[in-house]
Amino acid sequence: MCESIKIMSAHRPNDVALRHFFLMTKSTMYHLDFNIASASIQQEIIDYFFGIENWQYYDLCLFFFVANMISVEHIQPYVTDIIEQYVQKIMSQNTARMVAPVLIMILEASIVQHQYHLTSELLGKIAPLTFYQQNFEFQTWLLFWEGIFENDVQKIDDAYGITHRLHINTTKLLFDHILTHYQIEK
């Protein structure tokens, strides 16, 4: 899929949406091995986000899909901006629903990239927030990543327990993949 989109985007170099779709597919490949993109791709994405004044649904979706491939040190100002706009209720309700998943993805990226000072800072920013729709998926992922960050086996077990009770097998498989990466036995 990535290669076919790359070919399509070569024929339509001014199609930003197609380029973003290519970056999202590329990000999926990086995500499997917890890798980050080359400096030029990171800069391309950072430049795009730099031009955003008011975060829209599309922007947050793109951010969600490519956050793992960018050094979290470079995207920290955008996270602060997103949280500020969320708290000030500048976003539409539909756009605001993307904030929680984006924060979980940034939390993951900060832990995977061993940027623990940013992880701690992000957890501090998330704690006082109340999301419009506090769902089990967000809470489960937050619990899981806090468990990884704090090396708290009980939190990790509790997150697994939620996936088991709610029969969320996909999330359980993702947890397994992450724990394998960290060489944590469950």
Image (cartoon, helix red, strand yellow):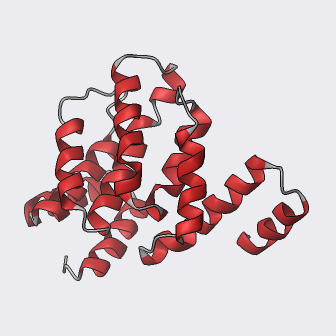
25 lies left or right of 77:
right
157 lies left or right of 55:
left
22 lies left or right of 151:
right
- The residue shown at (52%, 30%) is 55
Q: Is residue 66 visible?
A: yes
> Percent position (x, y) of residue 140?
27, 49
Figure quadrant of the N terminus: bottom right
> Percent position (x, y) of residue 63?
51, 47
Using the image, determine if residue 153 lies above or below residue 146.
below
Residue 122 found in image quarter? top left
Residue closer to the observer: 136 or 96: 96
The number of numbered discs placed on residues in the rendered structure image is 0
- The residue shown at (57%, 53%) is 45
Using the image, determine if residue 148 lies above or below residue 177.
above
Figure quadrant of the C terminus: bottom left
Residue closer to the observer: 82 or 169: 82
Q: Is residue 167 visible?
A: no
Q: Residue furthest top?
A: 89
> Percent position (x, y) of residue 164?
29, 59
